[in-house]
Image (spheres, rainbow, N blue to C red):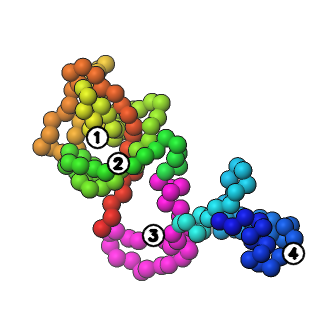
């Protein structure tokens, strides 16, 4: 992104104050963002996609198109960028949860994990993605595919992250 000096030159401004005011207006409108150091970057309007409305997945209804907002997929899918990462799915043990081979899962490291969440776990030295379950005082992992049995750790179970989203491209 251009700095204030470059913006002055590009816009034909004679003062840095004019460039500062223009950037301020762009930040207000969501065209640009500023980080903690004052550096400018593309705003949500330039990064995102238009959210136009809803579509009926049941019985057909008249289509209505209305600009509701600008949606930034990064912000929506990965609100905690420092703790999040993406993994490509291999295998079919989670297909009944809607997670297919080749999908990308967005995962987030957290301090605590709850039974019922889909997690990335290290079970006896092997990594896998399953539902975290609890039976009395013992945790285990449950697949979302009837072909597979639950995994009970022989030695240890470490939860690495929780799945927060799935991305599939058609």
3 and 4 marks in contact (CB < 8 Å): no
Sequence-first tag of 2 and 1: 2
Measure the C-alpha gap from mark 3 to mark 2: 29 Å
Measure the C-alpha gap from mark 4 to mark 2: 49 Å
| Location of residue 166 in the rendering, given as x and y in whole percent from the top left corner | 36, 53
Q: Nearer the viewer, mark 3 or mark 4?
A: 4
Task: Specify the quadrant of the image occupied by residue 104.
Answer: bottom left
What label sits on residue 140 in the rendered view?
Answer: none
Q: Is residue 164 above or below residue 44?
A: above
Sequence-first tag of 3 and 2: 3
The C terminus sits in image quarter: bottom left
Measure the C-alpha gap from mark 1 to mark 4: 58 Å
Question: Viewed as shown, does residue 40 lie left or right of 161?
Answer: right
- Per the image, label 1 sits on a secondary structure element best described as strand
Q: Residues within 10 Å of mark 3 (few under 14, many from 20)?
A: few
Measure the C-alpha gap from mark 3 to mark 4: 47 Å
User: What residue does disc 2 label?
Assistant: 87
Measure the C-alpha gap from mark 2 to mark 1: 10 Å
User: What residue does disc 4 label?
Assistant: 14
Q: The magenta stretch spans which residues?
A: 49-77
User: What residue does disc 3 label?
Assistant: 54
Q: Magenta span has 131?
A: no
Q: Nearer the viewer, mark 4 or mark 2?
A: 4
Q: Nearer the viewer, mark 3 or mark 2?
A: 2
4 and 2 marks in contact (CB < 8 Å): no
The N terminus sits in image quarter: bottom right
Q: Nearer the viewer, residue 4 or 159?
A: 4
User: What residue does disc 1 label?
Assistant: 129
Q: Which residue does the image show at 43% across and 80% down from the upper left? A: 63
């Amino acid at each position: 992104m251009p700095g204030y000096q470059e913006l002055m030159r590009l816009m034909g401004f004679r003062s840095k104050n004019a460039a500062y005011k223009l950037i301020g207006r762009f930040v207000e409108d969501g065209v640009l963002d500023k980080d903690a150091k004052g550096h400018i970057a593309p705003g949500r309007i330039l990064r995102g996609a238009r959210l136009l409305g809803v579509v009926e997945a049941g019985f057909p209804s008249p289509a209505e198109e209305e600009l509701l907002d600008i949606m930034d997929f990064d912000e929506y899918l990965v609100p905690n960028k420092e703790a999040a990462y993406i993994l490509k799915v291999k295998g079919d043990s989670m297909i009944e949860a809607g997670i297919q081979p080749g999908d990308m899962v967005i995962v987030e490291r957290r301090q605590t994990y709850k039974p019922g969440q889909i997690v990335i776990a290290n079970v006896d030295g092997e990594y896998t993605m399953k539902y975290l379950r609890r039976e009395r005082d013992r945790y285990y992992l449950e697949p979302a595919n009837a072909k597979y049995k639950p995994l009970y750790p022989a030695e240890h179970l470490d939860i690495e992250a929780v799945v927060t989203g799935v991305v599939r491209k058609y």
